[in-house]
Amino acid sequence: MPYFGCEETVKDLKRALSNPNVQADRLRYRNYITRVIRCMTEGVDVSSVFMEMVKASATVDVVQKKLVFLYMVTFAGAKPDMALLAINTLRKDCDNPNPMIRGLALRNMCNLRMPGIIEYIHQPVMNALRDKSAYVRRVAVLGCAKIHSLQPNAEIDGGVVNELYNLLRDPDPVVMVNCLRALEEILHHEGGVVINKPIAHHLINRLKDLDSWSQSEVLTFLLRYRPRNDDELFDILSLIDTFLLSAQPPVMAATLRLFLHLASAHPTVQADALTRARGPLLAACGAAAREMRFTALCHVQQVLRSQPTAYGSHYKRFFCAFSEPAYVKLRKIEILAELVNDENVALILEELKGYCTDVSTELAQAAIKAIGRIGRTYTEKCLEILTGLLALKQEHITSAVLQTYRDLVWFCPQSTAAVCRAVEGCDDLPQDDEGKQALLWLLGVHGEQISSAPYVLEGFIDGIKMEISSAVKMELLTASLKLFLSRPAETQDMLGRLLHYCIEEDSDMCVRDRALLHYRLLQCGVNETRKVLLGPKSDPSMTIITGRTEEPVNHWASSFNTLDPLLGAESRAQDVPGEISDGDEEIRINDPDQAFQNGTLKEGDTDGAPDASEEPRLSLSPLVSHDAFEKLWMELQVLHRQCLGVPRPSVSPDTLNSAFQLVKIQILAYSRSDARPWKLYMYSWSGGSVILAELLQDSADTVTLSIKQHPEERGAVEGFVSVVSNVLRTLNSS
Amino acid sequence: MISQVFILSSKGDHLIYKDFRGEVEKDSMSTFYEMVSSLSGDQPPVVMSRKGLNFIHIRHAGLYWVVSTKTDPSPFTVVEFLNRLVALIKDYCGSVCEKTVRMNFALIYELLDEMVDYGYIQTTSMDILKNFIQTEPVASKPFSLFDLSNVALFGAETQQSKVAPSTAAARPIMTSYSGEGSKNEIFVDVVERLSVVIGANGVVMKADVEGEIRVKCYLPSCSEMRIGVNEEFSIGKSQLRGYGATVRVDECSFHQSVKLDEFDTHRILKICPSQGEQTLMQYQLSDELPCPPPFRLFPTVEKDYGSRLLIFLKLRCDLPPKSSAINVSVTVPVPKGSLSLSQELSSPDQTAELRPKHKSVVWEIPRFPGGAQLSALFKVEVPGLSSASLQEVGPVSMSFELPKYTCTGLQLRFVRLSPNQQAPSHRWVRYVTHSESYTIRI
């Protein structure tokens, strides 16, 4: 497949390999075999020279032997019958006096993955387990695992397992570790190798004789072991303590993981281990190899989940180096944003500010978002930097700053005024979808504070034909409608145009449906629309959720020193912005949703003592217009009149209004507060019937409530009365 | 455990492919390359996963070195293993590049076969491996006199009697065919990496040094070697030795084969180096450099008439007069959309270049003697220059090499081989400081 004429090449090779002259010349012979291997690596199917290669395996030249074995292992599956021809040579080599040849032959024989091979290799492997050369024993031990994998469903050979358990006492450290590995595979279905007390202590005592690869592997196997009591636990911990400071990052990481695991019931010991390992982990963060740096950084992030302050004083270690690749820099920026405290905030912000103009847009945006995160705690300083960045008038920076503003306003309402000023001064519009959405959201929610909001929106509405993203269109619809609610005069006309375009001309179903929804909402009346559309403008409590909390170490200890922090954090980083916007979307639709649920609730529950807890039985929809109210009020007779015995609350009409809205009663009209008599008209829906009510205060101190209802339903009236009096009482008491 | 190890060129050519467990399809190489090439950005993430198959890779010499696995191994181990593989190939073949990998694929297969069995790392020690590896490395280019002209490490002072050319250490370890007389060499390198951040007001905000002592040994067998570092070398803040200026580091760690019995009293490291390259000691120093940082920059950035930006840089080298910096490169970020550059430099061997793609001006100085001061004036044409754009003239970063110089002041007093070493040998001690990251804010 990869090269033209490769069939020719293979034929040539076949011819050359079978040429006796070539076979006689050792170097030429080897040269042709090398060419076969090269073709094999490049992906050429050279299985047709198998026969010639088998012949070439019978040689004293070790290099040639190795090359041929490499070939045979690759193609044995395709040519099992011919591979059997090679078995003889291999078995002969297994008895070679040279342990290197014995090991080589045995290893490759076990690697021939084809049916029927087991009967040939079983005996040599068993013999080799008792070989006097450690090299051969290493191969044989893993050979047992290979045999098992060739017949996964066969019964486990108890003899082999016992033999392997005995070999754990082998003087050669690699044989010992290989035994653990082989047992782990063979006993996979039974839960893996059993680490009991004698084995565990044997392994721990031999740790210092092992090389770093084996050390980290053994330390990982020791995760299996549960010490009987605290004394034993602390004995073990003190034995492995020195490895915590190992110069080899793999050993250090494996030891730390074992520490965290063993001491899961002792948080102070865990914290202590993390502190001790800080030095080596920081050293790994500055390792020469950037992949190692990255790995260490990801694990530092994990540690920060439980010890947010641990690395605060080492923040300079996480400053980005000029030559580092972006993925290391991104991690460092994330970490820097987490390390901020009162002492270092100025220096970290100054460093991050330098990254904001980086040539890589990804990096620049990450730095801006990091500043935004810090802004949740140190709002003023960060706003200053962000606003300064807007002056650069570069699309990607503007877009990231706007997104950061949106999140900042949501989390820190105190920043709203400053953000609105900055947005107003920003005359450079973002070009990407994310940035547009952020700007539209800000204009919609805080439009009353941004004087230029209608003009900016108009620009978007005029350009809607060119807009491709449906998400932006939907955000535009919502923003225009919200702005209409706060500044109707300026927005009405363009809102009409927008709705018309979206309903009549847009081809995107979602956009059309959203536009229709908004249109029908408006048909119901402005107040209804306001009810549905306007939610909270910020949610400072979210800071507590997304802010720094000290997670228990045990939450993440199990994934320490696995691929998870490297993989997971990657996807986590991508999730975060999405999560936040999803979150507030949800909250924004939360209110009408709840109202709807409450509306259905009251259906099945009409009687029973009406009290404050049943307030939600009322509902605000459908909307009743002023005219309709007046008409109904004239038509109906007073059903119930009651003196509530409470004075009129001395609060502003707005407060009164929102208080009643909370209990799903809409106020329609009221007299000036100094008027005598003072009147207030309101309505609410209970099931299918509408309740109209008048609050009247003439000369007396207390107010009288008159109620008209259509159609009549006594139970609902009682509830209504109690709700109203409750509200008044609450307002008076506060 | 490791399922496969493979090496891909940057264009996706298959250079090496070794399957250890036969549990993964061979097309995983193509899968990996597809994933890598579909991603934007300068480098894909180190760990990627698809359909339960994890790929862990490093980039070295423009090649992808990849491990694929179905389990969830320790990332530290796998990354370290790949780095070790690169180092071993470098020891054997002299240098690592696509060409050496292509030419030495038989050797690399042999190495992999001995290093890993059934996906488990068996050994990576040069001492053990050299007994098993039979293939002879093919050097990518013969060691020729021509290379001597390309002296990078010791600057212009090649006329000195006993200086090893920088390429001398970039030879294959197995030297059966290299020039006679160069067989019995041992190089001891003190390499420091310097990261510095200097604030806009000239205050050093961060100064970190990561250093290591490396031994590269060409002797086929070496008896014990003794290396003495400064007597006044001290570790940590509390410990002070000697009366004069101490050489202090914050943290220090040693290779596990280093014997430290004379370290506490006489600051002597003892080791039997194995053939190839090893790191004997690593140390770190944060924030308390015993000397001033090597470069100070005095920048002036202003807006000229029209749309022209004036950047005037005065750069002073604070090294002692005897030392000098080489290959100095100063990168100054300039506003987006910069069109052209005209420069005034103080000597003809310096160059300056505008790189619009990287939004930067790069000023290169081949050699910068200690105590000297150089200046450069850059006039950059930026259409639509506003005063806000001056913000974009951000932190200046420098890269350079300081031969024969260590920032911590660490020196080797002696390198002694035990007297019973049979063959005569040459010992070379080299010091070099690299700029890991040298940032000066404007």
Image (cartoon, rainbow, N blue to C red):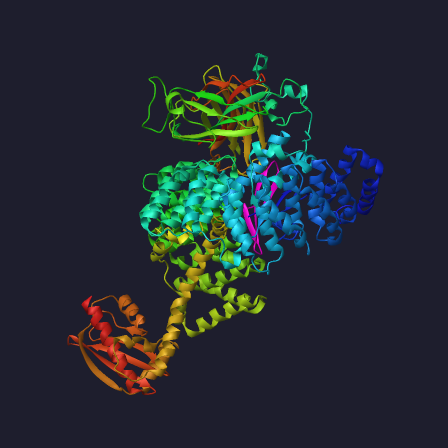
- Queried whether the magenta region covers residue A83, the answer comes back as no
Q: Nearer the viewer, residue B430 or B155?
A: B430
Single out the residue that lies furthest toward the left: A700
Is residue A446 something one can see in this rendering? yes
* Residues shaded magenta: B39-67
> Residue A665 at what x, y percent from top left?
31, 74
Q: Find residue A37 and report its image quarter.
A: top right
Is B351 situated above or below A704? above
Q: Nearer the viewer, residue B436 or A656?
A: B436
- Queried whether the magenta region covers residue B57, the answer comes back as yes
Residue depicted at x 60% and y 58%: A152
Q: Nearer the viewer, residue A51 or A245?
A: A51
Residue depicted at x 69% and y 56%: A116
Is residue A333 something one can see in this rendering? no
Is A120 situated above or below B303? below
Is A555 situated above or below B207? below
Residue depicted at x 50% and y 40%: A171
For the image, the number of numbered tags is 0
> Residue A63 at what x, y percent from top left?
70, 36
Q: Nearer the viewer, residue B82 or A102?
A: A102
> Residue B183 at what x, y percent from top left?
62, 21
Q: Find residue A346 and report its image quarter.
A: top left
Q: Which quadrant: the C terminus of chain A?
A: bottom left
Q: Find residue B139 and report its image quarter.
A: top right
